[in-house]
Image (cartoon, rainbow, N blue to C red):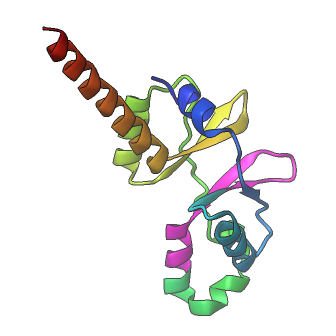
């Protein structure tokens, strides 16, 4: 299974903010959309970073509530690890585990075409294990 299938199942909706927006504005977007990360896109639509709940907590821990007025660009993770639609789910799990992050933007032809969360990966793995278990039960029942 590849990331392409995960996107087909969950959709390709990508929530983005601009780097000059304040952290408070980004938090409102995260809260309103009930998500844990947003991609940060430049005016030209290029990926320039990702902002996660962890980035926000670090900023608040370091600067207190004053951080809420900072630009997203000062808080975001600028070195974004991405994947492609052809990346296998197993490889994506390794990327997420090694990097210790929960959201990976999917890049296709130089543009963000989706975002995959650890929740998406877990949902896929649970469904695969359940399908395998059911196949084994069906096989045993036929014997």
Q: Residue furthest top?
A: 143
Percent of width and height locating residue 21: 79, 71
Q: Is residue 135 magenta?
A: no
Q: Would residue 84 appear left or right of 138 to someone viewing this image?
A: right
Where does residue 49 sit, x and y in percent of width and height?
65, 55
- Examine the image and state in which quarter residue 93 appears: top left
Q: Residue furthest right?
A: 43
Q: Residue furthest bottom?
A: 65
Q: Nearer the viewer, residue 15 or 136?
A: 136
Residue nearer the viewer, 129 or 93: 129
Q: Specify the segment rendered in magenta.
A: 39-59
Q: Quadrant of residue 33?
A: bottom right
Question: Residue 2 in the image: x percent, y percent?
Answer: 49, 25
Above or below for 68 versus 28: below
Residue at 44% of width from left, 54% of height from top?
101
Which residue appears at 33% of the width and 26% of the height?
131
Q: Nearer the viewer, residue 115 or 125?
A: 125
């Amino acid at each position: 299974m590849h990331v392409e299938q995960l996107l087909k199942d969950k959709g390709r909706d990508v929530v983005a903010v601009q780097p000059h927006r304040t952290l408070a504005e980004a938090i409102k977007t995260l809260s309103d959309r009930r998500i844990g990360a947003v991609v940060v896109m430049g005016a030209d639509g290029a990926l320039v970073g990702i902002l996660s709940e962890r980035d926000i907590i670090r900023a608040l821990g370091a600067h207190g509530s004053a951080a809420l007025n900072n630009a997203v660009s000062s808080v975001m993770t600028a070195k974004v690890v991405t994947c492609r639609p052809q990346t296998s789910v197993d490889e994506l799990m390794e990327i997420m585990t090694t990097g210790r992050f929960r959201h990976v933007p999917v890049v296709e032809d130089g543009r963000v075409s989706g975002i995959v969360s650890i929740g998406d990966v877990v949902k896929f793995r649970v469904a695969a294990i359940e399908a395998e278990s059911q196949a084994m039960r069906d096989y045993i029942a036929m014997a």
